[in-house]
Image: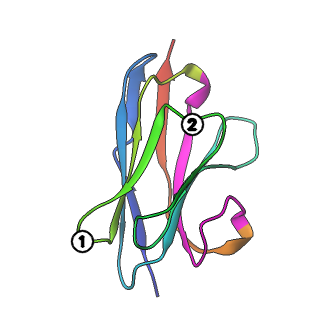
């Protein structure tokens, strides 16, 4: 069984930065970040391959967010810069076997971490 634990969420002003972490137990998987904004369905943010060599971003965050994998491979980071009020959401990491934006391809999910961006 794979467990995922997110951390790094919090309150930040618009234009600021946060770095989220996703620590995984067990084997290394492709990892994705998703978010659920207030009153909205959960949506894809970014994904990275198990090796760290392949990444994929939603258009809404491209150029502002960077996904990366730590040297030990079992931690994935989401560096979020130039944050906007519309980035306010609960952010979830998920583990799966392919680098994709489709939720159905991810088998394991974390509990989520709240990110609030004040304008």
Residue matched to label 1: 72
Q: Nearer the viewer, residue 96 or 114?
A: 96
The dot on residue 62 is 2
How would you rate the neighbour count of disc 2 (Cα within 10 Å): few for under 14, some for 14-19, many for 20 or more? few
How would you rate the neighbour count of disc 1 (Cα within 10 Å): few for under 14, some for 14-19, many for 20 or more? few
Residue 31, position in %: x, y? 50, 66
Query: Vertical placement of 108 versus 37: above or below?
Result: below
Query: Vertical placement of 119 versus 49: above or below?
Result: above
Residue at (57, 30) in percent of width and height: 87
Total marks in image: 2
- Residue 52, by quadrant, is bottom left
Q: Nearer the viewer, residue 107 or 32?
A: 32
Residue at (53, 47) in percent of width and height: 91
Query: Vertical placement of 92 versus 17: above or below?
Result: below
Residue at (46, 88) in percent of width and height: 1
Q: Is residue 61 magenta?
A: no
Residue 69, position in %: x, y? 35, 61
Residue at (65, 63) in percent of width and height: 100
42 sits left or right of 18 in the view: right
Residue 42, position in %: x, y? 70, 49
Q: Residue furthest left?
A: 71
Q: What is the span of residues highlighted in magenta in the rendered image?
A: 86-103
Q: Earlier in the sequence, mark 2 or mark 1?
A: 2
The dot on residue 5 is none
Q: Is residue 101 magenta?
A: yes
Q: Circle 2 — which element?
A: loop
Residue 80, position in %: x, y? 42, 35
Q: Nearer the viewer, residue 7 or 32?
A: 32
Tell me how far mark 2 sits from mark 1, CA to CA.
25 Å
116 sits left or right of 70 in the view: right
């Amino acid at each position: 069984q794979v467990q995922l634990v997110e951390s790094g969420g919090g309150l930040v002003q618009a234009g600021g930065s946060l770095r989220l972490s996703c620590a995984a137990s067990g084997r290394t998987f492709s990892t994705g970040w998703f978010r659920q904004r207030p009153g909205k369905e959960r949506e894809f943010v970014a994904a990275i391959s198990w090796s760290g060599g392949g990444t994929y971003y939603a258009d809404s965050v491209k150029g502002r967010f960077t996904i990366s994998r730590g040297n030990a491979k079992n931690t994935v980071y989401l560096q979020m810069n130039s944050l906007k009020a519309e980035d306010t959401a609960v952010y979830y990491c998920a583990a799966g076997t392919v680098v994709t934006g489709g939720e159905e391809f991810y088998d394991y999910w974390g509990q989520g971490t709240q990110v609030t961006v004040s304008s």
